Amino acid sequence: LAPRARSNSKVHRACSAPWFSEELKNLQRMYRRQERKWLLNKSLAERGILRESLRKDKTAIKLAKTSYFSNTIRGALNSPRELFKTVRSLISPSAEVTPLVNS
């Protein structure tokens, strides 16, 4: 028998953003559940429920992001140096990674 072929499927990992909480994970889970229900029967009622679930999910994510960024900036308001350092890290988080040296 031939050796078993490798699967090329991608593994989706949970969002690692600091503002992403269990509540948001549950809202996304509920949205996906509604999406699967709608895909089975394609009814207008299920579509309305799906859209409402998506709206709740997006609103909660936006609120969580806003709250996280506001609290992070508010924590650094006492010192201008800390404030600019915090804002810079929020705007371009990849800038904190050390650059590669060309060999």
Image: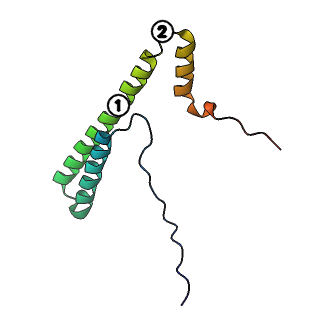
Residue beneath the point at 41% across and 48% down: 14
- Mark 2–mark 1 contact, CB under 8 Å? no
SS under mark 2: loop
Nearest the viewer among 63 and 41 is 63
Give, as a three-letter code, the residue at label 2.
Asn
61 to 12, vertically: above or below: above
The quarter of the rendered structure image containing the C terminus is top right
Gap in angstroms between the C-alphas marked 2 and 1:
23 Å
Residue ID for mark 1: 64
Earlier along the polypeptide chain: callout 2 or callout 1? 1
Give, as a three-letter code, the residue at label 1.
Ala
Density class for disc 1 (Cα within 10 Å; few <14, some 14-19, many ≥20) is some
Count of numbered labels shown in the rendering: 2
Nearest the viewer among 42 and 92 is 92
- Nearer the observer: mark 2 or 1; the answer is 2
Asked whether, in this view, residue 101 is left or right of residue 62, the answer is: right
- Residue 68, position as x, y percentages in the image: 39, 27
45 to 8, vertically: above or below: above
Residue beneath the point at 24% across and 64% down: 40
Q: Furthest residue to the left?
A: 45
Residue ID for mark 2: 78
SS under mark 1: helix
- Residue 4, position as x, y percentages in the image: 52, 80
